[in-house]
Image (spheres, grey):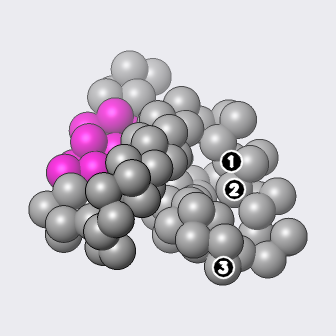
C-alpha cells in the first residue's frame, strides 16, 4: 500500500469540496495511517484559510512545489528508517 501520491491528489479535491464521499473516506483513512500526508493536509488546510482571508483565489505554484518536496523528504526518511 503506497497511496501517498493519490492521497495528495485527493487532498486537494477534498479541500476544494470536489471529492465524493467515497474519496473523502479514502483520504481520511490514509491520513490516519500516514503522518507525512497528514501534515500535508494540515498545511493545505491552513493555507486555504489564509488565502481565503486575503481574498485571493489561487495559491502560488511554488507553494505546491515546496509541499511536494517536503512530502518526498518525509517519505524517504521513513523508508530508510525501516
Ligand atoms: Zn501518505
Please name the predominant secondary structure of the magenta segment in the image: helix
Q: Cβ(mark 1) to ligand 1 < 8 Å? A: yes
- Boundaries of the magenta span: 66-75
User: Is residue 76 depicted above or below 58 in this figure?
Assistant: above
> Tags 1 and 3 in contact by the CB under 8 Å rule?
no
Mark found first going from the N terminus, 1 or 3: 3
Q: State the residue at coordinates (69%, 56%).
A: 27
User: Is residue 24 depicted above or below 58 in this figure?
Assistant: above
Residue 17 appears at what percent x and percent y?
Answer: 66, 72
- Which image quadrant: the C terminus? top left
Residue 30 appears at what percent x and percent y?
Answer: 68, 47
Q: State the residue at coordinates (50%, 39%).
A: 42
Of 81 and 50, nearer the camera is 50
Mark found first going from the N terminus, 2 or 3: 3
> Tags 1 and 2 in contact by the CB under 8 Å rule?
yes
* Residue matched to label 1: 30
Residue with the most extreme left position:
62
Q: Write down the quadrant of residue 2 in the picture.
A: bottom right
| C-alpha span from label 1 to label 2 | 5 Å
Compared across the picture, whether 9 is left or right of 53 comes to: right
* Residue matched to label 3: 18
* Residue matched to label 2: 27
Q: Cβ(mark 2) to ligand 1 < 8 Å? A: no
Residue 47 appears at what percent x and percent y?
Answer: 37, 49
Amino acid at each position: 500500500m503506497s497511496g501517498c501520491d493519490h492521497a495528495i491528489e485527493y487532498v486537494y479535491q477534498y479541500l476544494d469540496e470536489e471529492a465524493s464521499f467515497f474519496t473523502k473516506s479514502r483520504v481520511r483513512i490514509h491520513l490516519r495511517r500516514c503522518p507525512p500526508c497528514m501534515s500535508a493536509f494540515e498545511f493545505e488546510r491552513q493555507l486555504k484559510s489564509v488565502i481565503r482571508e486575503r481574498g485571493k483565489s489561487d495559491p502560488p505554484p511554488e507553494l505546491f512545489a515546496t509541499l511536494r518536496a517536503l512530502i518526498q523528504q518525509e517519505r524517504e526518511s521513513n523508508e530508510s528508517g525501516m
